[in-house]
Image (spheres, grey):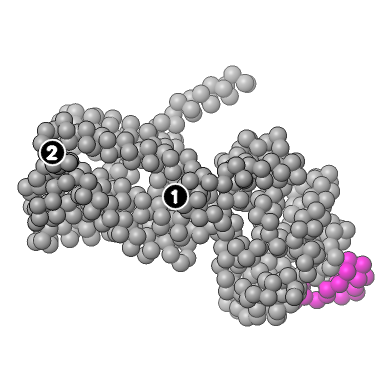
Amino acid sequence: MKLLEVNSVTKTFGSLVAVDNASMFIEQNEIVGLIGPNGSGKSTLLHTICGRTFATAGTIQLQGADITNKTPQIRAKAGMAIKFQLARIYLEKTVRENLLISLQAKQSILSQLRSASLKKHEVKILELAKEFQLEEYLNEPAKSLSHGQQQWLEIAMAMAVDPILLLLDEPTAGMSPKERADTAVLIKKASKKCGVLIVEHDLDFIKELCNRISVLHHGNIVATGTPAQIENDPKVKEVYLTRV
Amino acid sequence: MCWGQTGIFTFGQAALFGLGGYVVALVTTKSSITDMGILLLIAIVAGALAGFIIGIFLFSGKRVGELYVALVTLAISYICERLANSWTVLGSGNGIPGIPYPTIFGHELGSAMSLFFLAFIAFAIALILCILIVNSQFGLTMNAVRDDEERAEFFGYNRSVVQIFVFVFSAALASSAGALFAVSEGFVSPSMSGLALSTTSVLWVVLGGRGTFFGPLIALTVLQVVNIKMQNALPSLWPILVGFLLLLTMIFLPKGLTSLPARIRESRRKASQG
């Protein structure tokens, strides 16, 4: 059984076809890249996968369960976690509180009122902070972090709940080369625990990282293969690489 | 709890306050029940039930904006005031007079001082309860929903349940406050569930600072004291001055007047740095 299966998904906005009959899959512990030029529909496809919008046609299955019309909350409970293109963290809250927000999301209200899991979560918070180089900022507000650190915090928040599928929308946008290299290591590490889908327009970054890459153009997946296959695919060169 | 902690901008608190008052007025005048514990319990259940129904209507399903919630709850307050004004069972425009003094363990609370202490103890319990909730893990959940409810859903939070829970809790508090008001005054009238009180309570929060407990309390106390003096001194100008103060606070101190010392400290720190 595949971890994620996207079967002939179409998403239209009025007469505009943003995603047209796209199919792809992700296996357990696999890193899959989704690339394409601006306006190719990669963000829309990601949004139909995470539940921000619903597919007009086609189906999406997570570990065999149909999640096509499920809310983001149900998808999160099923094990899906996302990092958005622009880090959506709680800027006024501390790094510790941000991680706690993610960790306690699936707890009942009664359990939260009793603060029943604080000690258990604190262990996990320290682990994550160490892994994502945020240890010294635990009590600092998230707004005081650098751009790259904010991206890491959001990935840490996504990983906090031990997801089975991690969705990353341009995880290295605006990062320095050093931060990009560190992020690649973090994603590699994450893939040991779950499947990863990375939406990027930077082929150089994901060709080192991904097991497979799908290329989207005008809402269609025009090629899928290993990074080497994608790099040498004439269709990809024509529709994507020449435009970057 | 609603606005400051969870981002639910409600104008409906007066309707729920009035509900508690009217329920207690009806119970005490139509039956022999005067025990304060029972009366508070009835008011809390009535308020929670009303809050639950309104909450389901407002928050289940798709996300709605702050403005939508404000307008719907404003309309509810207006409807409640009109209903109280016109329904004879509720005494129409005259309200319901003759609410007897409450009793506790058979002892009648017949003096102003004993009623004050009753209200004060109830207030202290409510305040402690609110502080405990805000400082629990659930407090962080409320803030997560307030600051980015869509993001909270992507973490797996059930946003509707959180908002409904907070709304029900606030409704129960408002209703129990209405019950205390009714037994203290011995009288309920349509104005206690109407637009004026709803707006005034929002005014206290804006002036005092949303998200704080003591800010609105200070704003309420100061405003009420000044209100009494100024209404006699400047009867026509005073409401305009209050409106102007509200406007200035919203523009220059969105976190309320209680954030002023922190703002001054911050300015001084920046000035000393350079």
Examine the image and state in which quarter residue B218 appears.
top left
Percent x, y for residue A93? 57, 41
- Left or right, B65 with respect to A136, comes to left
Quarter of the image that includes the N terminus of chain A:
bottom right
Percent x, y for residue B245? 33, 35
Q: Read off the residue under disc 2.
A: B107
The subunit carrying tag 1 is B
- Left or right, B13 with respect to A195, comes to left
- SS at mark 2 in the image: strand
Q: Is A209 included in the stretch rendered in magenta?
A: no
Q: Which mark is residue B7?
A: 1
Looking at the image, tell me whether mark 1 or mark 2 is earlier in sequence order: 1
Distance of label 1 from label 2 (alpha carbons):
42 Å
Q: Which mark is residue B234?
A: none
Q: Nearer the viewer, residue A30 or B95?
A: A30
Can residue A106 be seen at all in this image of the molecule? yes
Circle 2: residue type: His
- Give me the residue at 53% from left, 26% from top: B266
Give the magenta-colored segment's residue range: A215-238
- Left or right, B249 with respect to A4, comes to left
- Give me the residue at 13% from left, 51% from top: B33
Q: Nearer the viewer, residue A76 or B240?
A: A76
Label 1 vs label 2, nearer the camera: 2
